[in-house]
Amino acid sequence: MYRYIRTRTASDEEALDLTQQVFVKALSGLQSYRNRGLPFGAWLFRIARNVVIDARRRRRPSVEWDLVPDLLQPSYEWGTEEVIVKQEALERLRELMLTLRPDQRELIVLRFEAQLPVAQIAKVLGKSYAATHKQLMRTLDLLKEAFRAQQ
């Protein structure tokens, strides 16, 4: 949950505060939770999404999404050249992520940072599986095309 929120906030401290708010809200609303085919995790992510949206509304002007956290953890097995190439590719990807609309970035974050399956993402966003899957595939295709165009 923290990792998902961190990708949508400007600082570690803000992400920690919002993560705490998510669990406080979840605990206070636990007695009203009804299993209606929505997985419990999706229910929590929907709370998290709403907490982040509310925080952005309170904090105007809003800060753009704070890039995907460093996914590249250099291994001791990599050579210097490989590390540099991977770091450059990651930086290009970060720049491309900033060109996406907020809803597209959110899809990427939910899928790859929060590691949610498409079915759960659809439930978090309140959309159909087909619409969510199609939007995710289009967003990934857009990123791939833009990434290749930069090479």
Image (spheres, rainbow, N blue to C red):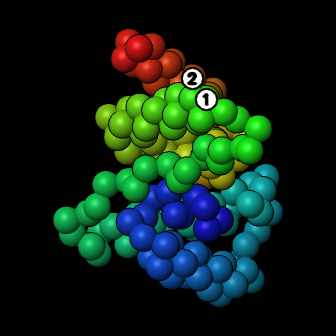
Q: Quadrant location of residue 61?
A: bottom left
Figure quadrant of the C terminus: top left
Instruction: Between residue 40 and residue 36, name the one nearer to us.
Output: 40
28 relative to 61, above or below = below
83 relative to 69, above or below = above
Give coordinates of residue 145: x percent, y percent. 44, 14
Which mark is drawn over residue 82? 1
53 relative to 69, above or below = below
Residue found at x 57% / y 23%: 137
Asked if the residue at tag 1 contacts the one at tag 2, i.e. Cβ–Cβ closer than 8 Å, the answer is no
Figure quadrant of the N terminus: bottom right
Q: SS at mark 2?
A: helix
1 relative to 145, above or below = below
Residue found at x 50% / y 49%: 68
Give coordinates of residue 112: x percent, y percent. 64, 42
Q: SS at mark 1?
A: helix
Residue found at x 47% / y 79%: 13
